[in-house]
Image (spheres, rainbow, N blue to C red):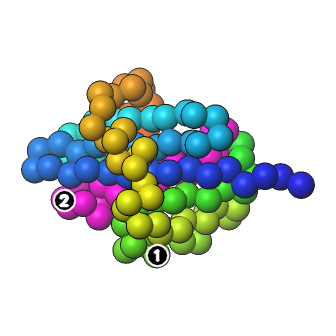
Amino acid sequence: MTNRKIIYVDASYQDITSSISLHEKETGASIVIKIDNKEFAIENINHAEALAVFNAILYIKKQDYKKSIILCDNENVAKQYASYEKGVRVIWIPREINIVADKLTKLENNTREKEINLLKYLFIKIGKI
């Protein structure tokens, strides 16, 4: 029996830049990505949160996890991505529970540019709902 992996995500949005974060509680893995809104066609907080969820789905696929739960504090995005990918559930949680992922959005980028460019390409082409 495969254990479900739990991934927390969050995003922050400002006029020019946004930040997305991912935190896997079990392993302690954390990803922080600072992005230029224009490059990613991010127009509001919902787009930034969607990018955070999309990044988590890519992370889950890269880790080859069979069953995962993404916890997101944006209810609209959680509903949109609820059954986006087989084996991955996106669930809304109250902002107060998403403390670690929220704090990560305030940290510096810890992701290689090559991975950011791949995320940008995939999100613009297929990720937005």
What is the crowding at mark 1: few (fewer than 14 residues within 10 Å), some, or many (at least 20)?
Answer: some
Q: Is residue 92 left or right of residue 102?
A: right
Indicate the position of residue 81 as horizontal and vertical percent values: 49, 68
Task: Tell me the quarter of the image containing the N terminus.
Answer: bottom right
Q: CA distance from mark 1 to mark 2?
A: 19 Å
Indicate the position of residue 54 as horizontal and vertical percent values: 46, 54
User: CB atoms at circles 1 and 2 under 8 Å apart?
Assistant: no
What is the crowding at mark 2: few (fewer than 14 residues within 10 Å), some, or many (at least 20)?
Answer: some
Of labels 1 and 2, the one closer to you: 1
What are the residue bounds of the magenta stretch?
Answer: 42-63
Residue in view at x 14 percent, y 49 percent:
14
Which residue corresponds to mark 1?
79
Report the amino acid beneath label 1.
Lys
Kindly tell me whether residue 128 is visible in this rendering. no
Indicate the position of residue 77 as horizontal and vertical percent values: 40, 68
Report the amino acid beneath label 2.
Glu
Q: Outermost residue, right direction?
A: 1
Which residue corresponds to mark 2?
43
Task: Tell me the quarter of the image containing the C terminus.
Answer: bottom left
Residue in view at x 71 percent, y 43 percent:
64
The secondary element bearing badge 2 is classed as loop
Residue in view at x 62 percent, y 46 percent:
60
Q: 129 or 102, which is in the foreground?
A: 102
The secondary element bearing badge 1 is classed as helix
